[in-house]
Amino acid sequence: MAYVISDECIACGACEAECPTGAISEGGGKYIIDPGACISCGACAAVCPVGAPNEE
């Protein structure tokens, strides 16, 4: 299952830099994950300071 970013996102950008497939982008004040590009590796969740990315 793909990861999704919850409303806890503080738009710091740490997750975007870690994503190996480039599935994460800024979108309307928080970051979003393209479910078609996400490989569920968990790299985004590992670096997020507020725990916003979660497996769907």
Image (spheres, rainbow, N blue to C red):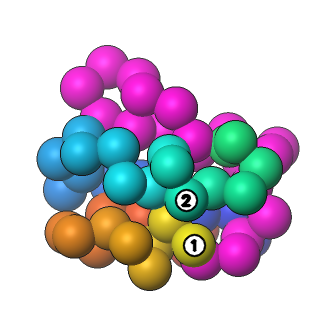
**Residue denoted by label 2:** 18
Say if mark 1 contacts mark 2, CB within 8 Å: yes
The kind of secondary structure element at disc 1 is helix
Of the pair 10 and 19, the residue shown nearer to us: 19
In whole angstroms, how far apart are the C-alphas of marks 1 and 2?
A: 6 Å
Residue pictured at 30% horizontal, 35% vertical: 30
Which quadrant, please, contains the N terminus? bottom right
Residue pictured at 41% horizontal, 23% vertical: 27
The percent coordinates of residue 54 (x first, y second) are 46, 71
In the rendered view, does 24 fall on the left or right side of 38? left
Of the pair 55 and 31, the residue shown nearer to us: 31
The percent coordinates of residue 48 (x first, y second) are 32, 67
Residue 32's tag is none
Which quadrant, please, contains the C terminus? bottom right
**Residue denoted by label 1:** 43
Where on the picture, by quarter, is residue 12? top left
32 relative to 52, above or below: above
Residue kind at label 2, given as amino acid type: Glu
